Amino acid sequence: MRAKRRIWATAAVATTAVAGVLVFEGVTGTSEVPDGIGAASGPARTEVHHDALKVSKDGATASLRRDRAEPFSMLGVTWTDPSVRVTGTVEARTRSVRTGDWSAWLPVDTEIDGRTEAGQPGVRGTTEPRWVGPSDGVEVRVSAGRNASAGLPAGLRLDTVDPGKASGTEPAAYAADATDEPSAGLTDGPSEPAESPAAEPTTDEPAPDGTTEPAPGEPVTGTPVDPAPSTDPGDDGSPSAPAGSPAPTATPTATLPPPLPSTAPKPPIVTRAGWGADESLNDESPEYTDTVKAVFVHHTAQTNAYSCADSAAIVRGLHAYHVQSNGWKDLGYNFVVDKCGTVFEGRKGGVDRAVLGAHTYGFNRETAGIAVIGMYTDSAAATAATTAVARIAAWKLGQYGVSPSGSTTLTAGANGTNYVGKTFTAGTAYTFGRISGHRDGFNTQCPGSKLYAQLPTIRGHAAGPVAGLTVTSVTGAALSGSTYYTTADVTVGWSATTPSVFVKAYELLVDGKAVATTAGGSSSAKATLAVGRHTVQVRATHLSGKTSLSAAATVVADRTAPVFSTKPGLSLRTGTVNTAAVPLTLKWKATDAVQLRDVRLTAPVARTYGPTTVSASHTAKSGTATTWRTTAYDRAGNSAAASVAGTPVILQESSAKRSGTWTTKSSSNYLGGASYASGTKNASLTWTFTGRSVAWVVSRASTSGQAHIYVDGVRTATVDLKSSATAYRQAIWTTSWPASAKHTVKIVVAGTKGRPTLTTDGLVYLG
């Protein structure tokens, strides 16, 4: 059996006060709309299509296949008795309008209680609705699972929802025809669900929700009859007034009190008009409670694979499903949030008032329900979504002076059990977090393990203080270890894990005093520092007024340049001598009043030396004057420069004054291609030069002997030229003076026994 339902209704004409709940006529809410979300030009035409499932003979399975279905984008399975649940599984697969492909089998969540809004006529048991996108084919299968002996609920039907199109901006890609095709593989069973025909009317008899419904194909006209006052439990499952209680008194002259200001700013909210709500679905006026003490967070629509461009359509689908499938008076949630962080107005009555919703069985009163579109059992919600949840929770609770942190007490309106097995007794008060998950008040996984694990973060964002506040950079300063050094103004950067929308202001503190104040969206500020050592911190003020302080960063302001306590100097060193590379040593010593960073050699080559280095080995071209330029830097960047120049000069052995016997030896291995050798004791060579450093150059071998060295007539050293390996052009001995002056160096053959001969390759001095 198929039925197609639409509800056309007028609002109640009276304002009624019943059991602490106010009911007002024709109330709508207003709010700002985020960028990119335009108000609909009019309500979208939503349609819900009902198709009875075919139940197997043993009553353990049921199914339906429709290859040419009415257009839909959302689906769910419902049954007659809202107090009964499907203990097995519900799965569906759909055919995409866009691609023509069938999806894989998709699980449909059964963890919902249709009695969440009990007291409404026509309330049905139901699965969660699942968003599947524009589809024109569907197959569904239901199994009782391990509890097959108990069978399936009576009156099983598939409900598919076409959310319609609003504002002329949403695509209409649906086929119009439809046929019934029960799934193959089932035994012949009853062609209709086990419920009375009146439960699925096809004539103008009253439907279970108290409305009348036209026959298929007949135009809808007139206004349905308002249902009689219900004697069922209250809207959150709380007991109705006891027998003998006076009937509620209608008060047509009552007026809705003005909305309360909040301690937190109101976030952007897409109104019902903005998402194209079909208000003809709602035949009752909103009800109100006196306060909002807590919010319950939910997930809905059972998929994360949606585009945020479809979010308004998803909200319309939820609205239609809750009303026409669940049998509720309106969309159950007070607010709906998509993964991009857009907040949609839920149940009508004014976003800035305490509207009684239908979201958490037994705990609808004095609470608000916030549903995040998506499935968060295995994946976490996006930061944009959790930020939006925290914003709406902070604002809503703030209207009633309630901090989002901590706990509160709520009175159960019905008996029940939560996810961890805690039982609730109607009329008894229980403690809840002011931001709780659906599973805290009902036996469901909702809002999914991952989103539930994000609730502490959501509470922290909403209640403050600002978390994760850290100084991340001090621009204009150099970091050494844990200390920054600067010569001038600095720009201090910071970060926080709390989103900026919850931050009222940041202050930059220097030595505990505020030197700059910035808006909550900023992440840096400038400071001018006096010379000396300072502590720099950032203080954040949350929207709640709570403050937090970052760890201190140490910044030293230093404007004094380093000094060269020992100016750079050059001296010859031992090593291999070439005309293009005479070995020498560059020496210096730099100091700083605060901390030296490094010394940099910029010419004739570029090198950088640490603060404790005082010398370095280099080479220079002989016969060429070279200037060695150095700059010392401190940690703050102050600098001082110093330089030294020198010219290495090679004196051939032939330029020396000789005594005794010397033999000339020729080889390309010698400087200038020649050298002198002598094994005669006391044979000598004497050079005279003007310079500040000198080196004697020799050839060495295993048979080389020793020599005595005289400087300015004074014997200063005896040098042994013996070497296990032959080596040429070796500067074997050096000496230096503080300043350039005229000097003589005399080499005397020592006549070492068994190896008297030595070979000299000249002398090098630094001029």
Image: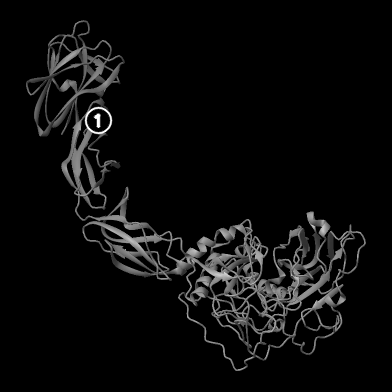
Q: Position of residue 567 (x, y in %)?
A: 16, 41
Farthest residue, direction bottom: 253
Q: Residue furthest front?
A: 244
* Residue type (three-letter) at the residue carrying disc 1: Pro
Residue 468, quarter of picture: bottom left
Report the number of discs: 1
Residue at coordinates 73% horizontally, 66% vertically from top-left?
127
Extreme residue in the right direction = 188
- The one nearer the camera, 696 or 197, is 197
Judging depth in this view, the residue of 720 and 36 nearest the camera is: 36
**What residue is shown at x 19% (from left), y 13% (from top)?**
706
Q: Nearer the viewer, residue 426 or 108?
A: 426
Left or right of residue 165: residue 409: left
566 is higher (above) or lower (below) than 102: above
Quadrant where the N terminus sits is bottom right
Quarter holding the C terminus? top left
Visible residue check, residue 621: yes
Q: Name the quadrant containing residue 312.
A: bottom right
List x then y, in percent, for residue 40: 64, 81
Which of the 4 image quadrants contains residue 48?
bottom right
- Horizontally, residue 322 falls left or right of residue 762, namely right
Q: Residue furthest left?
A: 713
Q: Can the viewer see residue 337?
A: no
> x%, y% of residue 139?
81, 63
Q: Measuring from the top left, give residue 313's x and y in whole percent.
A: 67, 73
Assess disc 1: are there few (<14), some (14-19) or many (≥20) residues with their C-alpha within 10 Å of its C-alpha: many
Q: Secondary structure at mark 1?
A: strand
Left or right of 555, for residue 274: right
Q: Which residue is mark 1?
A: 583
- Against 717, is 208 above or below? below
Q: Residue at x 25, y 30 (%)?
A: 583
**Nearer the observer, 281 or 482:** 281
